[in-house]
Amino acid sequence: MVVVRRRWFQAPWEFRESALFTAVSVIAGFIIQVAASGRGIAMPHLPFNAIALSVLAVLVLSTGLAFKNTHAVKWFGGIPLGLCLILAIALLSLIGGIIPQQPVAKESLPVLLGLNQIFSSWPFAVTVLLFLANLGISLSWKLIPFKPQNLQFILFHAGFWIALSCAVVGSSDLQRFVVPINVGKANNLGYTMESETPQHLPLSIYLHDFSLEEYPPQLLLYDPHNDKLMMNKAQAILEVRTGTTASWQGIEVLVLDYLPYALPGKDGVPQSADRKTGIPFAKVRIITPSTQREAWISTGSPMLKPDAAQLDGFYLIMMPGTPKSFRSAVTIQDEQGHETNANLEVNHPVSFMGWKLYQMGYDEKAGRWSKLSLIEVIHDPWLPAVYLGFFMIMAGNILFFWNGIKRREVVK
Amino acid sequence: MIMNFNTAAELAIVCWAIGSLLSLLANRTPALKLPAFLLSIAGALVMAGFIAFYWSALDRPPLRTLGETRLWYAALIPLVGFLVEYRWKIGGLKYYCMALATFLLSINMLHPEVFDKTLMPALQSPWFIPHVVVYLVGYVLLAASSVTALHNVYLQLRKQENSTGESVSHFLALLGFVFLSFGLIFGALWAKEAWGHYWTWDPKETWAFLSWLAYLGYLHAFRYKIDKSKLQWYLALAFVVLLVCWFGVNYLPSAQNSVHTYTQS
């Protein structure tokens, strides 16, 4: 076979032209970024972004179909350009995966190029736009005329097109607010990540109660001379329960009694108390080579000093357990008078009139006694479109998997 | 508890070592084939049994720390080796797989982890297990794909004909990609419920996206007229991106604010 080396720009175009085109586009993106003095791209809001996206979709699909047989469009919707654009997106994401992505006040070249906010920068936007065009054109060829064997291709590629475009274009309509509320109060002011001035929300939240459940407290041996915690022999986090045993070099500890909610009694013996005020107490027997004794230890609280047991220059202490769950009992109300009661908990958000409410945080210094709950309120009108894309990708993937295990292709 | 891990790990490693030895000897003495297979698979079953036992002792799925994920890989990677042998009659991969599993268990034996039952509220989700397990399976398939590709490269350099090997590395990558896609989307759906948004360019997300793109690129290059034997280099190296995503992210400057850093104990 005679191999004839293709000259630059000799039709049909392939990888060289695609790589050059991609590189020029990314560089152009960086130039626009610098010209805009480091400000990223500003996406229009609804309905303008939806109109623009529809125009793009129609334009791409009709170009793909109308000029199906021209070299330029064939190249523009082909795999070589697609691969180069995937590589460009990967390289830009690589920057975002290494450099911390956060606003920086200082002026410098990386900041001017938008490297610290790469995913809202011009080069990223330009690459994604070209990628959508490339993907859309290749999709148009498989869509029309429709053939059942193209279903996997269509579901995967159309799903990716919809999810990517709607996530990017819809990012301007995403509203996220943090609403801090104290128990027994209502609030309709929300804070965004960017500004310190609160905004009025179309809904108000009344906080009836905030409650936090902890894992059992932990038993630890503290070395004050070296300011460090000693690891026990079993290499385990020691959850305090009646009967828990622990051993360190030469020290044996047995938990004789455990009261999860108690308060100090008059004679020094803790008495069980209610959940709201009580703190964990444990009666421990400590055995060292020379002595054996018993003592009550406690985790303490913002109101009570913790009790530790001193032994041979060490302290046996009890640390409050980490949070297991926390929830806010709230009443949500909008301006039209709609009202609902709900329990907000991590991983259990609540929907209300197009908004979604999340249990976000609390006053961590006060822990179990926090009177403050942070609720995040989110409105994302583009979510159903993005999810449609996700489910199409997954459906396409199931077909891909099925064909993959069914058909054994031999590499030629 | 930790004592039990060492016993289980040592037992598994001994099974794999004797199994591999017998399997090598089976080339001359075919009667050894069955005991070799049974011993090798017993090693993986020991690990699977230990995971089940550990799960019930922890009262939570052991998927939270890096060390816990290594347990799963140690149980699953050899199984892929056996599957490839069964499906494509390629016996070499299982030795790599058992060696890799032994290596992962050795890390856990050298760095015993703190036995901790707690699970932070954000991880208490029905998505936790599917998200991590789908990723585990994806990683296992892609690890096997990468090892096969590396072996293919070695054979190429020695100018040996090997089209089955190239077909195996391709199919493992294809199946692995499907699992990566599911893991990525499950993660997005979970993130929406737990953190309020499906995509926030958290460093781990960015790297998961990057590794997904790496294999997306591979599949398109494969479909296009690119020399299949050159793509073996690509497949062998693509796994490096996955390794960065699995544990390398923790060491990158961008990881300061990640919600995904595994608990370091």
Image (spheres, rainbow, N blue to C red):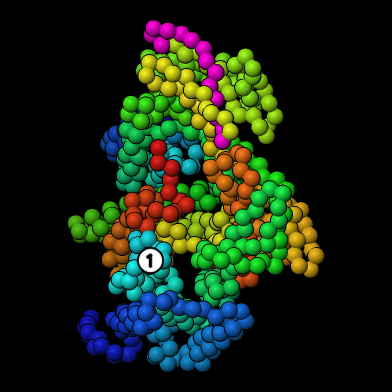
Image quadrant for the N terminus of chain A?
Answer: bottom left
Q: Is residue A388 visible?
A: no
Residue B130: say if magenta. Answer: no
Q: Residue at x 62, y 55 (%)?
A: A180
In the image, taking residue A411 as reference, residue B183 lies left or right, namely right
**Is A356 displayed left or right of B132 in the figure?**
right
Q: Residue at x 56, y 21 (%)?
A: A282
Q: How far from the left and from the top, in percent, is residue B43?
A: 41, 33
Q: Amino acid at mark 1?
A: Val
Q: Chain of mark 1?
A: A
Q: In the visual, does B222 lie left or right of A329?
A: left
Q: Which residues are magenta?
A: A288-302
Where residue A226 appears, as percent x and y from the top left, is 32, 29
B254 relative to A266, above or below: below
Which of A303 and B59 lies nearest the eye of the viewer? A303
Q: Is residue A3 visible?
A: yes
In the depicted structure, whether residue B189 falls above or below residue A126: above
* SS under mark 1: loop
Q: Observer-nearest residue: A191 or A97?
A: A191
